Image: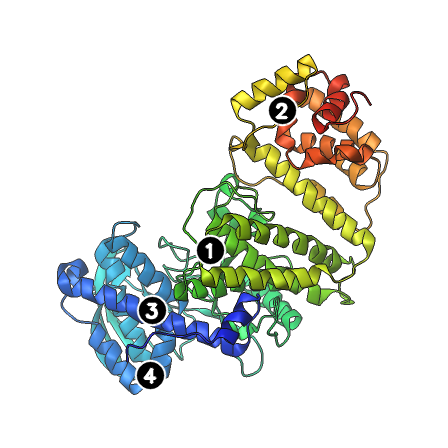
Amino acid sequence: MYAPIRMPGPLFDEIAAGGGSADAVAFLVRGERTRRLLLLHELLDVLDADPGLLGPLRGRAAWPVIEAAAVRAPGPVDELLLTPQVGGWLAHTLRRLYGTAFGPPLWADAGQIASVAAVAAVLAGTAAELLLPAREGAVSLPSLGMVRLPGPAGFHPVAVTVSGGTLTLSTGHGPDTVVTPLRDPESAHWLPVHRLDTGSGARAVQLDDVDPYRDLDEPIAPGRLEPGELHAWQAVFRDAVAILGAGGDGPGGLRPEEISRIVPWDARDGDDATLPVPAEGLSASTGDAFASMVIARPPDGLALAETLVHEFQHSKLGALLHLFPLLGDDRSEHHYAPWRADPRHLPGLLHGAYAFVGVTGFWRERIGDPADHDDRAPFLFALRRLQTRMVLRTLATRATLTGPGRRLVARLSETVDGWLREPLDPATTARARAAAVSHRVEWRLRHLRCAEDDRITLVKAMRTGAAPIRTGEPLITREPGGGYWHDGRAALYARTRTRAGRSSTPDELLVTGDPEAARAAYTERLTVTGPPDPHALAGWLLAHTALHPRDRRLLARPERLRPLLAVSPPEEWTRVAHWLAGGPAAG
């Protein structure tokens, strides 16, 4: 009964390589079920020890209702306990009980277990009498929907009777509200969770805009989609399912029915200045809610399909981390992630590498697709395989990996190394490499600085004509305001038909093969703004090293050049760059 879960080695290796058969994913789900039951057990122990935590709901026990429903219908109740709605609520409530999260009155969070019990009774067709927490005039039924109630807003208990799949809710203000969630259409008082079709006979995916625990942690208000927006989601999801097809076992493959829930994210709900990615491309997930993801609706099915693959990779790794410790919990944010604008810690780097192995595989599968008119797939495959391999190398050399962690990183590296041996058009590979270098150089200029003593010594050596000194590890800093910065050059490298013209920007001149004109344009821009402009400074360096390939070593640590240009006139910058690179004194 209490035997530990043992994951067969071949299933671990399937997941570790970045993919996963249906059997491998089912094993992860089994692990999530065990974890979910353990967390429920912990919550019940806390509530048994202090029944006062349930406040006005303490009079009627919820767990016996769940047990009775599980005896009648074990499969549906099991599925309920595994839903993202239950997982998000449970994790949030336990964090509240241990003082690491905030929210509504504690009894309303803890009392959501009664709502879980009511749904279990509905699914099983059993009878129950419960007190449910109402918040702002509504009761949440996890995975089913939300009941709007007459009477006051705020937080208060609501008496509920469940019988034959029907709920009768009484607030004492006006007539009772009667809902049969599994049959009733949407109405003024009943808002069911939207469902997205994944194909004939396959499980539908929830499109959840009402559950209070649908965000990554803190409860949020319902945000019902307008009919037009709902239609747009249905259309783009239908296209994404067609692109994914039946899925596959390898990296980048995804069986759409394995997704449990999508939470639509409205860009108006966030502050763009604090986001590490553009708001229109935002997506996120949490290990508390397996196979659930928060997504800002992408413009088309291809973008959504990529996002679904990306976020399901996070879910798989999160489930694996619940079974095995993979690396030390070093949360120092000073590592480069090519897909982020900000410095990352090593656990975040592992998640990113795993997700982007899936993304790389996704684009690999799209190569040669007639629908890919702009040849995006070869470029993105070439770019992501380079960037992901770089991060895997960082993990292999910098992270404190456990035995399973080393096995995971080794399998991921084998996958990417195999892809790096696959031939691509040389021009595409060159554009991808240039885009990767551009992002890394600008990231370093934005986030890294020479230590003050090193800066002073470098400047002194330059002015006296001495040889450049070796400097220590750079210091992490953050640009004022932080948040997302747009890598416009990468977008230009991704285009196959970019042409320079009379009104070309410095970036366009560089990308289209005119580094001399690009360097002059960047110099002019830096003369106005000053060398601290990291985008223009990165462009200047890229143009300079295209003209003087012997100076390419400057791209490894561009932050060393920044303080030297700041104290030199523009007409001296080429000479300074040569000096720092160890090349000729003039040029």
The picture places residue 466, in percent across and down from the top left corner, at 68, 17
The Cα–Cα distance between marks 1 and 3, rounded to whole angstroms, is: 26 Å
Measure the alpha-carbon separation of dots 4 and 3. Answer: 15 Å
> Which mark is in front, 4 or 2?
2
> Of all residues shown, which one is farthest toward the bottom?
72
Question: Would you name the residue on which mark 2 appears?
Answer: 469
Image quarter where the C terminus lies is top right
Residue 571 drawn above or below residue 372:
above
Residue position for label 3: 36
Q: Quadrant of residue 569?
A: top right
Horizontally, residue 355 falls left or right of residue 150, namely right
* N-term mark: 4 or 1: 4
Q: Position of residue 68 (x, y in %)?
A: 24, 82
The answer to whether residue 96 of the structure is visible from this angle is: yes
Q: Give the spatial CA distance, label 4 vs label 1.
A: 39 Å
Residue at label 4? 74
